[in-house]
Image (cartoon, grey):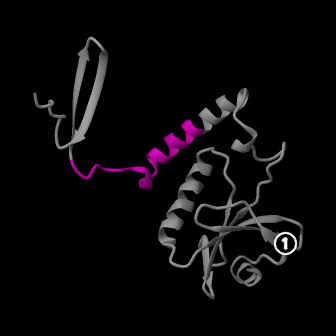
Amino acid sequence: MAGILALSYRITVAHVSEGPAGTATRNYVAEDREGRNWFVKSYPAGTELAKERQALALGESAGLGGVLVPAERQTVTGDVIASAGGLSVSVAEYVEGTSEGAHTAEGGLIGERWAAAGEAVGRLHRILARHPAGRHALSRPVRCATSNGPAGGWRSCSPGGPPRAAAP
């Protein structure tokens, strides 16, 4: 770990410890010789790194749009993921989960946190909807049927046409 961080990111590591659990990655916190902490995400062998780069680009777009996200550190070649000796990693600034730093769901959504979470999610949706990777096209047409019957209005959509009536 120390070797790839030094060669690819110019981070001289003093200490590395296990970081917060990842879904499909092993995460670490690396402290450099100046005392700064870095979040290091280690990708398992076989990971589609092109997709991981796209995900990191979405995070960068969110940050440029005003969503608070940790800044990704680029390698000396300008990439966001470094690979060497069977190890692939990305590095971002580490944000402590303290009263002065990040607030996570572990603290619960109470009071003002609900409004703040809603505002952040709304901003994130608006930003990502404009991002090229956020635009999705349906693979086949979708038709919808609507009704304003006695039970209230409803809308039912299905690929290829409206839902069929049940057989008698």
Density class for disc 1 (Cα within 10 Å; few <14, some 14-19, many ≥20) is some
Residue 28 visible in this rendered orientation of the protein: yes
Q: Residue furthest left?
A: 168
Q: Quadrant of the C terminus?
A: top left
Q: Quadrant of the N terminus?
A: bottom right
x then y, percent, for residue 39: 73, 64
Residue, disc 1: 32
x then y, percent, for residue 70: 69, 55
Instruction: State left or right for residue 28 relative to residue 119.
Output: right
Can you tell which quarter of the image residue 59 is in?
bottom right
| Range drawn in magenta | 121-140
Q: Where 61 sits versus 116, above or below? A: below
Query: Is residue 59 inside the magenta stretch?
Result: no
Q: Main secondary structure of the magenta part?
A: helix
Q: Measuring 66% from the left and 51% from the top, which residue is drawn there?
A: 69
Q: Measuring 48% from the left and 72% from the top, which residue is drawn there?
A: 48
Query: Is residue 125 inside the magenta stretch?
Result: yes
Type of amino acid at the residue the image marks with label 1: Asp
